[in-house]
Amino acid sequence: MDPVALIAVIVLFAFVVLLVGIPLRSGTAEAADERERRDIEALQEAKRAKYREIRELEMDFRTGKLTLEDFRAQDRARRGEAIDLLRRLDALGATPAPVEDAGAPARAGEASSASRDGA
């Protein structure tokens, strides 16, 4: 086979591969964007659920269902998990979701101890 013909066949093959590969690559980028969007939504829902857990824990403490020691230990663990979720959201570049009317949970010992003391 002539070397010029061989080079022409190789160039033609590369051109065909490039033409076929371009649409496939754009689909991969779209799939990655969709996957990232789903990850962000899942993390935001997990964050809302974690905030609910913390508020419920505070309510249990205020109603006397938990001792101060138990409350602090569980509160610390749940807040650590919430911080982890927030860091993961930041890593994905997620914009902060609007805060619900109930808001983020109060810091341990602030609102909880004030409510318990009757202040």
Image (spheres, grey):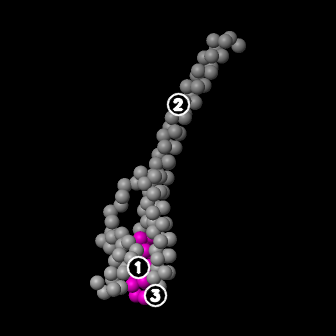
Q: Which mark is residue 58?
A: 1
Residue at mark 2: 19
Residue at 33%, 81% in the rendered image: 114
The reply to whether callout 1 and callout 3 are in contact (CB within 8 Å) is no
Q: Secondary structure at mark 1?
A: helix
Question: Where does the magenta region start and end?
Answer: 49-64
- Between 1 and 28, the residue placed more toward the observer is 28
Disc 2 crowd, CA 10 A, few/some/many (<14, 14-19, 20+): few
Of the residues shown, which amino acid type is indicated by label 2? Leu
Q: Of label 2 and label 3, which has the lower sequence position?
A: 2
Where is residue 57? Give x, y as percent: 44, 79
Quick check: 10 left or right of 98?
right
Q: Is residue 113 above or below residue 105?
A: below
Q: Is residue 58 above or below residue 94?
A: below
Q: Secondary structure at mark 3?
A: loop
Residue at mark 3: 65
Q: Of label 1 and label 3, which has the lower sequence position?
A: 1
